[in-house]
Image (cartoon, rainbow, N blue to C red):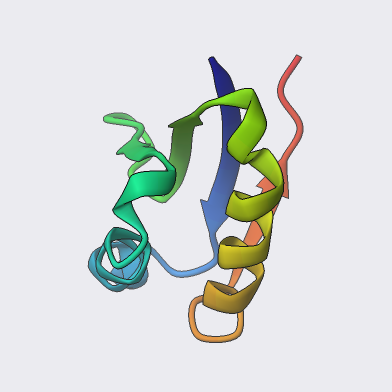
Amino acid sequence: MANIHIVLKEKSKIVLFHFLYSLHQHLGWPRSNSKKPEEITILTTDDLIVENKIILNSIKKIVLFDFLEKS
């Protein structure tokens, strides 16, 4: 299972991000960090990483966020 980690620039945009991503729900499962809700991990499969990045880049035009690198 692959993960994509992002952090939203504005905490108030969490619901909007989840709504926009849910329009493409077959690509993965977003989960907010309980201690830092603006930090979101998207659980997906290895074969859907490219499709997820395309969708996330289109969402990024509406909701500002950065991709995080996790070790």
Question: Along the horizontal axis of the image, is 15 left or right of 71?
Answer: left
Residue drawn at (55%, 50%), measured in percent from left and top? Answer: 7
In x, y percent, where is residue 62?
50, 85
In x, y percent, where is residue 45?
54, 26
In x, y percent, where is residue 14?
31, 62
Question: Along the horizontal axis of the image, is 6 left or right of 39?
Answer: right
Q: Specify the farthest residue to the bottom.
A: 62
Is residue 55 or residue 36 the one in the foreground?
55
Relative to residue 8, is residue 50 depicted above or below?
A: above
Is residue 26 or residue 36 the one in the foreground?
26
Relative to residue 62, is residue 51 depicted above or below?
A: above
Question: Along the horizontal axis of the image, is 70 left or right of 42?
Answer: right
Is residue 47 or residue 71 the one in the foreground?
47
Relative to residue 49, is residue 50 depicted above or below?
A: below
In x, y percent, where is residue 48?
59, 39
Residue drawn at (60%, 77%), measured in percent from left and top? Answer: 58
Question: Along the horizontal axis of the image, is 62 left or right of 54?
Answer: left
Residue drawn at (27%, 60%), measured in percent from left and top? Answer: 22
Q: How many marks?
A: 0
- Determine which quarter of the picture holds residue 53: bottom right
Task: Give the position of the C terminus as an image quadrant.
Answer: top right
- Determine which quarter of the picture holds residue 34: top left
